[in-house]
Amino acid sequence: MPVNIHGKQYMTVAERVNDFCKAGTKNGIETELVTDDGSKVVMRALIKDANGMIQGSGYAEEVRGSTNINKTSALENCETSAIGRALASVGFGGTEYATANEVTDAILQQKVMEATERLVAHNKAVVRNIDAIYAIKTHIANDELIEALTVASDIDQEDKALLWMAPTKGGIFTTIEIAELKKTNKLRVK
């Protein structure tokens, strides 16, 4: 059964292979390891007719350790993707060329990259504002909340947004420190 991802129907490789076998063609699937250099794996899959003529092909690349499955089974995962792409090239792909597995992996990788970019931006803001951060943390620890808020108000708005990242996402300030600043700011505004 195809998987709905963002309104599009993607078939799994298993479904494509099943449909291919049910079609009763004399075509076969052949795979070849193109590269395995210890960090990445590249596979090619060919769909050949009974005379050995290539009817379609598909390539796939996986980086070892990039996902949980690729920590132990990058070669197998790569071969499966190559087969799915080769089958799509000869009409066994449903409405989309990519497989459900590939799209799911791509979405996961995109989320990881976005989180990494946010964390890098946060860390750069920490470097730019390390003295202010130290002062804020010291003032909070000494129960000098107005002074902490005064230092915080001098931080650039863009950096402030980056620095106030939740600690569960790698933020520099603890949940208690952020709450103290917010509470003090509300008292100060009134």
Image: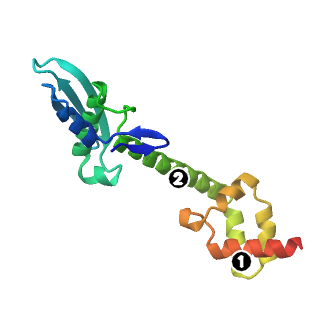
The reply, left or right, for residue 100 in relation to residue 127 is left
Please, is residue 140 above or below residue 155 in the view?
below
Is 127 or 167 nearer to us in this picture? 167
The reply, left or right, for residue 132 in relation to residue 18 is right
Task: Estimate the x, y position of residue 46 in percent, counting from the top left.
Answer: 20, 27
- The answer, for residue 126, to whether it is visible in the render is yes
Task: Estimate the x, y position of residue 7 in percent, counting from the top left.
Answer: 49, 41
Task: Estimate the x, y position of residue 104 in percent, counting from the top left.
Answer: 40, 46
Secondary element type, mark 1: helix
Please, is residue 84 above or below residue 124 in the view?
above
- The answer, for residue 36, to whether it is visible in the render is no
The quadrant where residue 178 appears: bottom right
Can you identify the residue that label 2 sits on?
Answer: 115
Q: Amino acid at mark 2?
A: Ala
Marks 2, 1: nearer the viewer = 2
Quarter of the image where the C terminus is located: bottom right
Measured Cα–Cα span from mark 2 to mark 1: 28 Å
Q: Residue furthest right?
A: 190
Can you identify the residue that label 1 sits on?
Answer: 140
The reply, left or right, for residue 63 in relation to residue 155 is left
Residue drawn where x is 48% and y is 45% of the image:
110
Please, is residue 129 above or below residue 178 in the view?
above
The quadrant where residue 32 appears: top left
Q: Amino acid at mark 1?
A: Ile
The quadrant where residue 181 appears: bottom right
Q: Residues within 10 Å of mark 1 (few under 14, many from 20)?
A: many
Q: Residues within 10 Å of mark 2 (few under 14, many from 20)?
A: some
Residue drawn where x is 66% and y is 62% of the image:
164
Please, is residue 4 above or below residue 176 in the view?
above
Q: Earlier in the sequence, mark 2 or mark 1?
A: 2
Quarter of the image where the N terminus is located: top left
